[in-house]
Amino acid sequence: AVVTGASRGIGQAIAVALAGAGADMAITARDMGSLEDTAGRIAALGRAAHLFALDVLDVTACGEVVAGAAATLGGLDILVNNAGYEEIRPSLDVDEALWDRIVSTNLKGAFFCAQAAAREMAKSGRGAIVNLCSLTSYVGVPTAVPYGSSKSGLMGMTHALATEWAGLGIRVNAIAPGYFRTGMTDVFYQDEAWQQAMLAKIPQRRFGALEDVAGAVVFLASDASAYVTGTCIPIDGGYLASI
């Protein structure tokens, strides 16, 4: 399995969960040194962890790193497109540079990693790709318009690739994490009033824990979901069901 953006947060939790389910791992981040903690957790589970530096803004590198990971692992069964970027900014203040960074990281980078993975998976006639969508793939969030646009696009990409690559034996699905406190989202959680307002909207009355993403990703990456493709599983404590 390859997991992008695996140095911390949700990406790290996914990589460790896949290792716990029996996968040898290739993990990527912009700074390869930041992957050491994840690698140690994977090694503790008795699985191999191969580290690769990758900035998904570099399309050429996306292809080279995924192909190199497949060669190192002896094949490729799973790709999780987790690498992402967000910056909160009122829409009237969004400039082209911010738009391009967010959309290119979250959508363009995910596509070219998926394309490279599919080329490897097609050799064996099977594989599973899991994309990281978001609640913003479904609902509008003020001050997060570039992010929501990229994640809505990622949902559309998931549908389209699942349809196109089914004949290659490749399944493409997604998860949509709800409100999880990570390094990227911490700016929200610093506002106590925001926390209380959001908790009131979540039927389970709690924010997500990193471990909450593990089961869904392992399911979508495994043969347990052999007849599931082109879908997205919200992991949101019931938020979307309640609106």
Image (cartoon, rainbow, N blue to C red):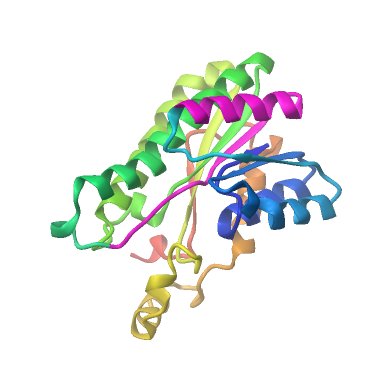
Of 219 and 95, the residue lying toward us = 95
Does residue 164 appear anywhere in the picture? yes
Residue 144's x, y, as percent? 28, 58
Residue 185's x, y, as percent? 43, 65
Q: Quadrant of residue 157?
A: top left
Extent of the magenta region: 60-88
Whether residue 24 sits left or right of residue 225 in the image: it is: right
- Look at 34% across and 47% down and name the residue there: 102
From the viewer's perspective, is residue 156 above or below residue 144?
A: above
Does 78 appear in magenta?
Answer: yes
Q: Quadrant of residue 25?
A: top right
Residue found at the very far left of the displayed protein = 92
Whether residue 126 sits left or right of residue 45 in the image: it is: left
Quadrant of the frame with the N terminus: top right
From the viewer's perspective, is residue 167 above or below residue 18?
A: above
- Look at 84% across and 55% down and name the residue there: 44
- Look at 50% across and 69% down and name the residue there: 181
- Look at 50% across and 46% down and name the residue there: 83
Residue 216's x, y, as percent? 61, 50
Does 11 appear in magenta?
Answer: no
Quadrant of the frame with the C terminus: bottom left
Does residue 114 appear anywhere in the picture? no
